[in-house]
Amino acid sequence: SQQGEEDPQALSIQEGENATMNCSYKTSINNLQWYRQNSGRGLVHLILIRSNEREKHSGRLRVTLDTSKKSSSLLITASRAADTASYFCATDIYDKVIFGPGTSLSVIP
Amino acid sequence: GAVVSQHPSRVICKSGTSVKIECRSLDFQATTMFWYRQFPKQSLMLMATSNEGSKATYEQGVEKDKFLINHASLTLSTLTVTSAHPEDSSFYICSAPPPGQWGETQYFGPGTRLLVL
């Protein structure tokens, strides 16, 4: 099962630019997580934001959460070619982690 | 840190055969593990919840007789794709929450790529 949407589905930017990805979900959540997946590889956990938090930072990552709108955003600042990957938001519902459809990010050197 | 492993990492089989995929928690006990399937250029779809000592819970639309799950110990869950067909070709990923961290992050295995000819 999946819930919500992510936009854009695909994003292509120049190295050094910022990349913003958005995620919407449908039900109440305990927390929301963002993951990265390089092509054909496993998942890398990036950041977790709890339902009572509004913003969280980790290095070049900034995540916001708006529970009233059931949406979250992931901002990657000063992007690098190595950031090229698919990014997924995932929500924790009744102890199951449900993934959004993902955003494919391409950072052009 | 906690690590989840999967074996094999890649398997090619003939149509009609059964394939077993193992998911192990290497340095923690996992009473529950989750199995996901990911088709190319798509997201991860939760297939089932594997419960140690009891039956797995399957998501809607997932055939329990085709995808057999056995959680025989606190560190091992297996997914058996029975009578595999080409449409079962996919990337299978397991995950497990470390003890005491329910509702927090989960640890994901590196995935198993299945190709059915």
Image (spheres, coloured by chain):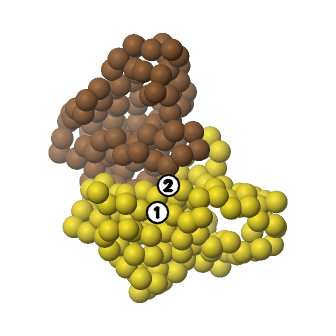
Chain colours: A brown, B yellow
| Residue at the image position 82 percent from the left and 60 percent from the top | B117
Q: Position of residue A26 (x, y in %)?
A: 40, 47
Q: Is residue A97 left or right of residue B42?
A: left
Mark linked to residue B110: 2
Spatial separation of the CA atoms under disc 2 and disc 1:
7 Å
Mark linked to residue A8: none
Q: Is residue B83 left or right of residue B60?
A: right
Between A87 and A80, the residue placed more toward the observer is A80
Secondary-structure class at tag 1: strand
Q: Is residue A53 left or right of residue B62?
A: left
Host chain of mark 2? B
Q: Amino acid at mark 2?
A: Pro
Q: Position of residue B65 (x, y in %)?
A: 65, 79
Q: Is residue B40 above or below residue B72?
A: above
Instruction: Residue B44: tell me if it is visible.
Output: yes
Q: Is residue B71 above or below residue A58?
A: below
| Residue at the image position 34 percent from the left and 31 percent from the top | A73
Q: Quadrant of residue B114?
A: bottom right
Q: Amino acid at mark 1?
A: Ser
- Which residue is labeled 1 in the image? B5
Secondary-structure class at tag 2: loop
Whether pointer 2 and pointer 1 mark residues with C-beta atoms closer than 8 Å, the reply is yes
Between B59 and A13, the residue placed more toward the observer is A13
| Residue at the image position 41 percent from the left and 45 percent from the top | A44
